[in-house]
Amino acid sequence: MTKNIAVIRGDGIGPEILEQALKVLDKIAEIYGHTFNYTDVDMGGCAIDKWGNPLPEEMLKKCVESDSVLLGAVGGEKWNNVPGDMRPEKGLLRLRAGMGVYSNNRPAKIWKQLADASPLKKEIVDKGIDFIIVRELIGGIYFGEHTTSEENSEKKAVDVLSYTESEIERIGRIGFETARKRNKRLCSVEKSNVLDSSRLWKAVMHRLEKEYPDVELSDMLVDNCAMQIVKNPAQFDVIVTENMFGDILSDEASMITGSIGMIPSSSLGATSCGLYEPIHGSAPDIAGMDIANPIGTILSSAMMLRYSFDMSKEADAIENAVSAVLDEGFRTADIMSNGCKKVGCSEMGKLIISQLERK
């Protein structure tokens, strides 16, 4: 099978972690008889430096015309003072909108080898942490109207949070369908005691509930959910929520698993062309030092194989190889613990490829 992949190396540690993911994909292609063609795309700070734009139209076109997009990381302090509409992160927002990927699916799963790295008490971790946050990605306050003005000699800023029924319904269906494939429990998270947008969200979710009688739907206010994720994460199977709430909760959920360097994510819409990326940032302070953790990016490539290319056994092979390397005690600096062997970014990639070669 031949697939065309748009590759966004990005900023900071992005290029080095992406390089390891591509080497893993090349080994998968060799073992399973596939061909992966890569097209480099400039996005983020590097695109600002080169083109004066965080995502030129030509680059967006390459992504839209690909079979899928694999992203390293974008951003950094270097570009903190550029105009707001030209920041590196704006390129990512444009990419999501341009690709029409409205559902970000981020697993929060603790690897048994890293249980001691979780900041939670052992008795909480032992109950298990394995849930998915389904976040609406191209609506809400991040994509609403943003205005600044001056009233009575002081500055005023307004960010508009709005959702339509159809926007809520399409992400709600993703939540129900995801729960249907797992343990059939869906928690809808909002702030309906305060926000009209959340009251509409809750109403639409309960209307959809009638179409999924096999899925147990529950409601939870976002502040309570933030507390419950650290108090009793085992209660969750699938969480579905709006853009800003999902942004915050998914970052919180990633930390209870031990390291954000281990967490992949997928962003999908109406087609199989998805956007895959690790959840961590560009970490410019360690860029080029060969100490970054590439596993989140490598696992993101596995998600791409599974959800965009329908290559489940290839995705399983990557995930099993990662688990085997962890079993042997190899760790990057961010997940290092006593008795383990510290390795760098490139060495971790080589170890995972070595495990693939043993299959």
Image: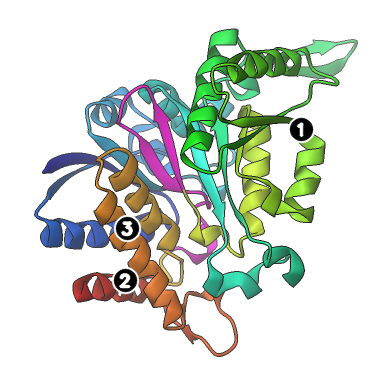
Q: Residue at x 62, y 57 (%)?
A: 129
Considering the numbered disc 1 on the image, is that residue within a helix, a strand or a loop? Answer: strand
For label 3, the residue is 316
Residue 188 shown left or right of residue 76 in the figure = right
* Nearest to viewer (mark 2 / mark 3): 3
Residue 250 in the image: above or below residue 53: below
Considering the numbered disc 2 on the image, is that residue within a helix, a strand or a loop? Answer: helix
Q: In front: 33, or 7?
A: 33
> How would you rate the neighbour count of disc 2 (Cα within 10 Å): few for under 14, some for 14-19, many for 20 or more?
many
Q: Residue at x 57, y 33 (%)?
A: 135
- Residue 306's image quarter? top left
For label 2, the residue is 352
* Nearest to viewer (mark 1 / mark 2): 1
Q: In front: 296, or 233?
A: 233
Residue 236 shown left or right of residue 193 in the figure = left
| Residues at marks 3 and 1, CA–CA distance in whole angstroms | 33 Å
First in sequence, mark 2 or 3: give its number.
Answer: 3
Q: In the rendered structure, are the residues bearing label 3 and label 1 in contact, judged by CB atoms less than 8 Å apart?
A: no
Q: In front: 89, or 153?
A: 89
For label 1, the residue is 220
Q: Position of residue 75 (x, y in %)?
A: 50, 45
For badge 1, the amino acid type reads: Met
Q: What's the magenta region?
A: 265-287
Q: Residue at x 45, y 72 (%)?
A: 291
Q: In the rendered structure, are the residues bearing label 1 and label 2 in contact, judged by CB atoms less than 8 Å apart?
A: no
Residue 78 shown left or right of residue 185 in the figure = left
